[in-house]
Image (cartoon, grey):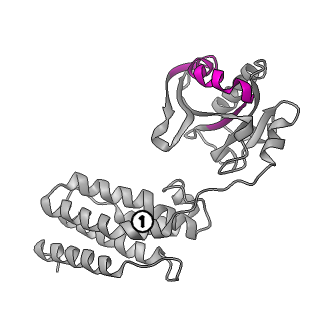
């Protein structure tokens, strides 16, 4: 096991990792274990989960996938586990362990597929260097935001939010504002700061100045405050989208959507 990655992490996480490696290394179906996420940045604390990649012999992969819940249960006191289709990763098993309570993500990957990844994980254990060699076959690539995809949709989202505010469906409006933060503003702000565009993940630490601006997009359950937050969201987006030929701005949709927002502000006595 790569001890330098374990020296500064909480004891709960360290003990789980040692138990996991000891359990998997005696099973010939497994080739290695690697860790990603906050462990790579040496920033783990008591609130961190564990993001683990488990490399599997290709010919045994189907068998492992069929038994992965039982495998996870053999590693500790498993309370519940479910697969990650909701985050676009069906290979992922999201686990909650007890005694003590710990969130662990186990991604089971065939050795033939480990080269396709979004980051270079830290290999904690492997057989005969095979995991490292498989990783060396390519470089990691985190998907960048599709700027044109966002621009094509953003003004429709703004209009949708304004209609929900106008009708008084404020939970819907607050949800829309949260969606814009996680799917548009957060990724673009992190991208500008040189970080991975992963929603709003760790944005307070990676881009603290932008995070302070982003706080203004959080609305209370109030019509006027929702309109204010929507307006701030628009201005932040305008400051983040590139003014280059990289993106064709939907100016007509933008004017129409913002005229609608302005009309809603007038109706609510904001102007």
Reply yes or no: does residue 52 show up in magenta. Answer: yes
Q: Is residue 86 left or right of residue 174?
A: right
Query: Against 47, is 21 above or below?
Result: above
| Residue closest to the eye, 12 or 87 | 87
- For the C terminus, the quadrant is bottom left
Q: Residue at x 28, y 56 (%)?
A: 174
Give the number of callouts: 1
Coordinates of residue 70 in the picture (x, y in percent) = 58, 17
Coordinates of residue 187 in the picture (x, y in percent) = 50, 62
| Mark 1 neighbour class, 10 Å CA radius: few under 14, some 14 to 19, many 20 or more | many
Query: Against 212, is 221 above or below?
Result: above
Reply yes or no: does residue 143 show up in magenta. Answer: no
Q: Where on the picture, by quarter, is residue 104?
A: top right
Residue linked to disc 1:
214
Name the outermost residue toward the front. 59
Query: Against 46, is 102 above or below?
Result: above
| Residue closest to the eye, 256 or 261 | 256
Span colored in magenta? 51-79
Q: Is residue 160 left or right of residue 67?
A: left
Name the outermost residue toward the right. 128
Coordinates of residue 150 in the picture (x, y in percent) = 43, 66
Coordinates of residue 134 in the picture (x, y in percent) = 80, 42
> What secondary structure is found at the residue carrying circle 1?
helix
Q: Where on the picture, by quarter, is residue 183?
A: bottom left
Q: Residue at x 51, y 65 (%)?
A: 146
- For the N terminus, the quadrant is top right
């Amino acid at each position: 096991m790569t001890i330098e990655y374990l020296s500064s992490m909480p004891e709960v996480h360290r003990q789980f990792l040692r138990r996991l490696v000891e359990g998997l290394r005696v099973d010939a179906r497994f080739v290695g274990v690697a860790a990603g996420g906050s462990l790579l940045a040496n920033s783990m604390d008591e609130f961190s989960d564990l993001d683990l990649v488990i490399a599997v012999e290709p010919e045994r992969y189907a068998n492992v996938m069929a038994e992965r819940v039982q495998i996870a249960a053999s590693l500790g006191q498993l309370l519940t586990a479910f697969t990650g289709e909701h985050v676009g990763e069906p290979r992922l098993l999201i686990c909650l362990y007890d005694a003590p309570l710990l969130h662990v993500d186990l991604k089971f990957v065939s050795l033939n597929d480990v080269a396709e990844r979004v980051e270079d994980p830290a290999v904690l254990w492997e057989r005969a260097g095979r995991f490292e060699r498989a990783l060396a076959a390519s470089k990691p690539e985190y998907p960048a935001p599709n700027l044109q995809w966002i621009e094509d949709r953003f003004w429709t989202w703004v209009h949708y939010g304004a209609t929900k505010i106008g009708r008084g469906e404020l939970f819907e409006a607050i949800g829309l504002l949260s969606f814009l933060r996680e799917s548009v503003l957060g990724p673009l702000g992190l991208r500008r700061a040189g970080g991975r565009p992963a929603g709003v993940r760790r944005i307070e630490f990676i881009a603290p100045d932008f995070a302070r601006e982003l706080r203004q997009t959080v609305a209370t359950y109030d019509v006027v405050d929702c309109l204010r937050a929507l307006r701030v969201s628009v201005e932040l987006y305008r400051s983040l989208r590139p003014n280059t030929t990289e993106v064709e701005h939907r100016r007509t949709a933008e004017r129409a959507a913002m005229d609608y927002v302005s009309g809603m502000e007038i109706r609510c006595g904001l102007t």
